[in-house]
Image: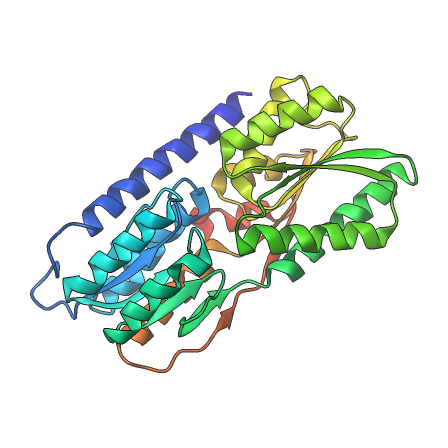
Amino acid sequence: MKHLRRALSAVSLAAVAALALSGCATGAGGSGSEDSKGAVAMSFAGLDIQIWNDMLPFMEDVVNEAGYDFVTDDPKWDVNTQVADWESWIVRGDIKAIMGYPAQSDAMVAVTQQAQDAGIPVLGYGSTWDGVTAAVVLDHKADGYKAGERAAEWIKKTYGNTKVDVGFLGYPDTDLGRLRGEGMMEALNKAGLNLNINEHKVLNLDDGYAAAQNQLNAFPETKVWLAIANDPALGAYQALVDSGVSPTDESVMLLNLDATDAELKIIAEPGSFWRYAFIPVTRQIAEANAKMLVAAANGEKVEDTVIPTTEVTSENAEQYLIANQ
């Protein structure tokens, strides 16, 4: 429990640091230095997602080394705020390229066209929409399917044809969440297991904690927990431990996509019931984002880049900690 509290404290501190970075980068001034070539902008839907906070320093390093200033925002999952932020960037005069993960893709089409009309290429992170020049993407459905296959393998080995209650922490409101969920469910259905799957719509750590409590209230014997993202998974982990589940319970499995240091440290613990994570390596995806932004700002041709996911278990989790990347 002490380890978990330390992990959660690390999440909070990292989020504060990233928000501080964002606050500095989004100042009203233009270029931060006399020899700056202008600025490029990164717009995540909200900075309550820890892996996005972890990516920002890596991205800033690449962008600054290329001679550009780095601008970010925090729309807090409000699409109107995100649109307004992009509109302000378009009229600033120094923004050379914008990359984004929209709170709602179709709502960004008009402002994307405004940017393109102003000569500012728009790039996608995680998904694409009408008007995007290129994107750094993950094959969300394939990644979800791969995770679902691993979950099915463990369930079959552990429980055979016995009926198993499954808590599924999804988020169908974004392309990423919907496609990852579809991939997971497709793999589980194909496996022909005896599963009672209950889906909970979750976005962050608190949602995951509440969803796990609700799942346990309805199905106290739930042994399998699947999540399309790391923050809800961490919340579910805390809820399970708080409910009395041993961190090394051999009958329980938690599996998710994405991971930050907080999750990786738990997965690395010997015998942890948090058994698997499928992750795009943080530095790899951050640098791919930043390099595409710089190339677009330089007027170079850019093409879609697909980032693969890596399976993480207790055997290799430590090598993917931020300090080891």
**What's the colour scheme?**
rainbow
Q: Quadrant of the C terminus?
A: bottom left
**In the displayed image of the protein, which residue is found farthest to the right?**
161
Tell which of 166 and 172 is nearer to you: 172
The answer to whether 241 is drawn above or below residue 81 in the figure is above
Number of marks in picture? 0
Q: Quadrant of residue 291?
A: bottom left
Tell which of 6 and 152 is nearer to you: 152
The answer to whether 60 is drawn above or below residue 205 in the figure is below
Tell which of 21 and 173 is nearer to you: 173
**Residue at the location (12% across, 59% down)?**
30
Residue 324 at x, y percent in the picture: 46, 50
Q: Quadrant of residue 276?
A: top right
**Residue at the location (66% across, 61% down)?**
142
Q: Quadrant of residue 86?
A: bottom left
Work out whether residue 86 can be spotted. Answer: yes
**Residue at the location (80% across, 44% down)?**
154
The answer to whether 86 is drawn above or below residue 322 in the figure is below
Work out whether residue 69 can be spotted. Answer: no
Residue 205 at x, y percent in the picture: 50, 33
Q: Is residue 94 left or right of residue 134?
A: left
Q: Quadrant of the N terminus?
A: top right
Tell which of 308 and 141 is nearer to you: 141
Residue 76 at x, y percent in the picture: 36, 42
The answer to whether 30 is drawn above or below residue 298 in the figure is above
Q: Is residue 153 left or right of residue 205?
A: right
Q: Is residue 255 left or right of residue 176?
A: right
Residue 149 at x, y percent in the picture: 76, 53
Q: Is residue 191 left or right of residue 295?
A: right
